[in-house]
Image: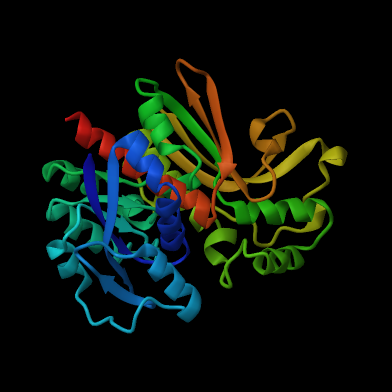
Amino acid sequence: MQDLKLAFIGFGTVGQGFARLLQSKESILIEEHDLKIEVTTIIDKVMGMVVDPGGVDLANVLARVERDGKISNEMEVDSRQMIKDGNFDVLVEVSFTDIETAEPAISFIKAALQSGKHVISTNKGPPALAMKELEGLAKENGVYYRYEGTVLSGTPCLNLSSEAMRGVSIHSIRGILNGTCNYILEEMEQGTGYEQALNTAQELGYAEADPTADVEGFDAATKIVILANKLMNANLSVSDVDRSGIVGLTTDEIKKPDESGFKTKLIASAHRKNEKVNLQVGVNKLTLADPLANVNGVLNAATFSTDTLGDVTVIGPGAGSKATAQSLFSDLLAINDKLTTY
């Protein structure tokens, strides 16, 4: 029986979702994977912290968050030092995402890897800005850094391509990587104005109060950088993306598919040409035969054009606490498999 101790940095929607998933899957982890999980540390800059080397009672913590909106009143802590000195094997890094500096997440991840701890994360900032460095640091210290949930949430994408499709050469990637924009564009196809569609998306929780990262294409740009660097061996940054969003579009520019024969989508793409990978995010008109044209609502999708399989398309939820928690769960099991294999 493998015994892995976990520490959470961040305990918002995703962290809580993962905690609930660990609870519901406890018997499966033990019976099917010979894996016992204990959470020894939870730190959240807003909700406080709890540390118990003998194992935190997740049910009690979740109930406290539900009741009080926080874990505890205790918060005076040097998070990086606690990561280095903490009694745990795997850091669950689900803190705030900053796509400009990747801080403080990147420092948390470095502290864990340098102290011989594995990392699973849904934070897209660090792999977008420092993927090669962090993966090199993990290898140097004999640990694993996995970040499946940074692109399509729980829908298999990075690991599908790098593991299940090992040996395949990917020539290009095209994807709907932002559900907020996908929803807004569909509403506009039906005649709803941009502002009204955005307001509805915000009311439904699909868009943030400040939707800039979504509607101006930054979120999709960050994700296509991760895909290109991981799966096409590129070495690019968000500034290398030829980016435009959906701001300024009018309903006159977006006709109903039955009138135009096309669907309007915000597409993120990576294309290899003459050994160079070019990245782009922008509005595209897709024929109805294109698999991406039929990706509706807030779903995400990616099409990988390969040498041996042709085009492979994956479609699924690209956000939500349960779906994102699943990506952490799969990464945790992958690490356990590697540890038990060797």
Residue 169 position within the rendered picture, expressed as x and y whole percent measured from the top left: 39, 22
Above-or-below relation of 315 to 221: above
Give left or right: position of 259 versus 58: right
Q: Residue at x 67, y 40 (%)?
A: 295
216 or 312, nearer to the observer: 312
Q: Residue at x 56, y 71 (%)?
A: 210
327 or 24, nearer to the observer: 24
Q: Residue at x 36, y 57 (%)?
A: 125
**Split into 4 quadrants, where in the image is the N terminus?**
top left
Q: Quadrant of residue 342?
A: top left
Q: How is the image coloured?
A: rainbow
**In the rendered image, is residue 220 in sight?**
no
Residue 307 position within the rendered picture, expressed as x and y whole percent measured from the top left: 45, 17
244 or 228, nearer to the observer: 228
**In the rendered image, is residue 236 in sight?**
yes
Q: Residue at x 42, y 40 (%)?
A: 227
Above-or-below relation of 287 to 46: above
Q: Quadrant of residue 316?
A: top right
Q: Which residue is outermost to the right?
A: 259
172 or 149, nearer to the observer: 149
